[in-house]
Image (spheres, helix red, strand yellow):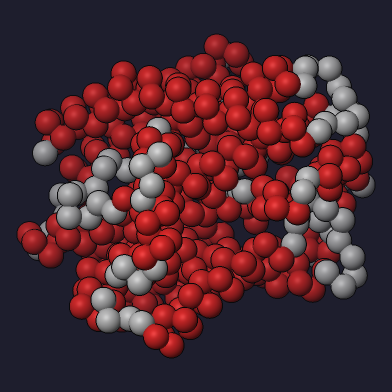
Amino acid sequence: MTRATQTPPEPGLRMAELDGIRALAILLVVSFHSWYFLQFLMPTTEAFLAFSDSLPWLLGFIRRGDLGVDIFFVLSGYLLSSQLFKKRMKSGHINVKRFYAHRFFRIYPLYFIALLLAFIDGGITWKILGNLLAYNIWTDAANIIIPWTWSLSVELQFYALVPLLILLVRGGKTLAMLSTACALLTVGWSYWILTAHPQLASQSLIDLKLAGKDDDIALFYKYLYVAMPVRLSQFTFGMAGAWVVLHYATSLSKIGGVTKIMLVILILLGAGLPLVHNPFTNLTDTYRPIVYFELLFGRVTFAAAIALMIVLLHANTLPRLKNFLSLRFLEPIARFSFSMYLFHPIFIYLGIVAFIGTDKTETISVLQYAGVVSVAILGSMLFGFITWHVIERPAIRFARKKFG
């Protein structure tokens, strides 16, 4: 959630192509949830599986649209670290008070509105404390008031750590060690969970749901999806990318030829690894080792690939991709992405009402799904336009005026 979670970067750091990456990330998330939430409208898991399998091959990526959150985390690490590294290089220190004040006024004004809406629906309970202080992802999922805001809790925990991490990084070797340690933490944590709960690798989420194993599904989400150890490497790879861009700009500008080809291949391989399986369909004996490998290394390689892509975009090594990501129509999507992230399920529901209805249904067509997605994207963008001008931008300006 870069624009969704950062103030706009300094002029020297602004890259239009990052807006494009951010926009595509939120579109992935909205498309994913528009698909995922349809299961609650269908009477059986088998019906939802049949609908999922009916999607054209070109739309298969939607089932891994959750990777949009991974992209947000890498971008978050990159942009925040870029700003803090530059400030430390200029002044020799980081104004921690200013940093936290800016983070607070960027996140909490709109987040308070989202929580208020949730309270109207479900009432005020003690769960508010966990959601405000972002420790809700360490407890049962039932304690997350707005389920899809688990990623915001992860972000807030990273914000608590990032000034300390920046202060610890005194050179490229230190940062390389930090990135490696976090990658090993992610892999080691995943290995520990899969060893303790082997069914999470031997059965897909759909397999578990078909078997009625809701407790195992809850384990997967708590320990292999929302847990900070699984996500921390994504932020630190973004930090590493920021360091490389700030300290090796001249060398980056000379990348070309065979080196460029090899780096592009690495990006494709790293980004493609999480796509080798669809976690929501049945697993065969042949596929299980592949899935196990992906569960261990998929998020690490994907994060590394996104960070490397950002670095190459900065070096103008990928001009065609840079031009595409810099298209003007992507910028407003990026600007409103935080609001879109918080409120898009409301518009998914409106899309469902408009194109499908609220009664249980055995079948949903691709065109109906497309209608739901369209309402979700356009509706949340319009709402984002309003919240940006009424809430987000005034809060950002107040923080800059008050804290510099």
Q: Give the residue displayed 22% in from the left and 68% down from the top.
A: 246
Residue 132 placement (x, y as % from top left): 44, 31
Viewer-nearest residue: 39 or 179: 39
Quarter of the image for the C terminus: give it.
Answer: top left
Please report the residue visible at 36 percent of the width from the left and 42 percent of the height from the top. Answer: 328
Name which residue lies at 24% across and 38% down. 102
Q: Quadrant of residue 107?
A: top left
- Left or right relative to 202: residue 400: left
Q: Is residue 314 above or below residue 207?
A: below
Image quadrant holding the N terminus, namely top left
Which is nearer the eye, 269 or 16?
Answer: 16
Is residue 191 in sight in this rendering? Answer: yes
Question: Relative to 26, does residue 183 appear above or below in the rendering?
Answer: below
| Residue located 40% across and 39% down the image | 329
Residue 36 spot, x, y in % from top left: 71, 38
Q: How many marks?
A: 0
**Residue 377 appears at what percent x and percent y?**
54, 31
Q: Position of residue 173 (x, y in %)?
A: 31, 81
Answer with left or right where residue 307 lies relative to residue 191: left
In the image, residue 262 sits, relative to residue 133, either above or below, namely: below
- Residue at the far bottom in the pictured view: 258
Residue 55 relative to residue 177: left or right = right
